[in-house]
């Protein structure tokens, strides 16, 4: 079951990060129209934190489910 958690984390975490980047970049571009470098940097940091969050969340969910479900 842990192999499936790793596969899901590797597939869905980058998708979540890409979505977070696109959404936050569109919003930061409106707030910082003169400084697009700052908008990209803030969006990238938000996307990376989203990716780490989802990797941890997926792995923890599988660990909890693995311990709770009967074998």
Image: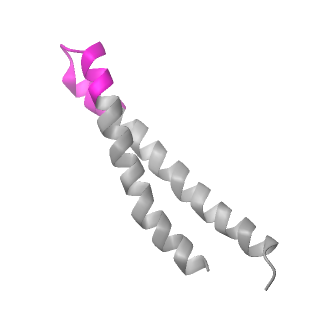
Q: Is residue 67 left or right of residue 42?
A: right
Q: Is residue 29 left or right of residue 51?
A: left
Answer above or below: position of 61 versus 4.
above
**Rendered location of residue 55, percent (x, y):** 52, 58
Residue visible at 41% across and 46% down in the picture: 48
For the residue pair 41 and 57, the one nearer the viewer reads as 57
What span is in magenta?
26-42
Label count reads: 0
Residue visible at 60% across and 77% down in the picture: 2
**Rendered location of residue 9, percent (x, y):** 49, 64
Q: How is the image coloured?
A: one colour
For the C terminus, the quadrant is bottom right
The residue sitting at the bottom extreme is 71
- Give residue 38's quadrant in the image: top left
- Give residue 13's quadrant in the image: bottom left
Answer above or below: position of 44 versus 55.
above
**Rendered location of residue 15, percent (x, y):** 37, 54
Residue visible at 43% across and 66% down in the picture: 10
For the residue pair 56 and 65, the one nearer the viewer reads as 65
Q: Is residue 59 left or right of residue 22?
A: right
Q: Main secondary structure of the magenta part?
A: helix
- Give residue 34's quadrant in the image: top left
Q: Is residue 42 left or right of residue 66?
A: left
Answer above or below: position of 44 versus 34.
below
For the N terminus, the quadrant is bottom right
The residue sitting at the front extreme is 70
Magenta-colored stretch includes residue 33: yes
Magenta-colored stretch includes residue 30: yes
Residue visible at 26% across and 32% down in the picture: 40
């Amino acid at each position: 079951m842990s192999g499936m958690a790793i596969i899901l984390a590797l597939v869905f975490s980058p998708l979540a990060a890409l979505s977070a980047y696109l959404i936050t970049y569109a919003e930061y571009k409106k707030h910082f129209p003169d400084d697009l470098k700052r908008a990209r940097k803030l969006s990238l940091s938000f996307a990376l934190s989203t990716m780490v969050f989802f990797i941890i969340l997926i792995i923890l969910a599988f660990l909890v489910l693995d311990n709770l479900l009967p074998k």
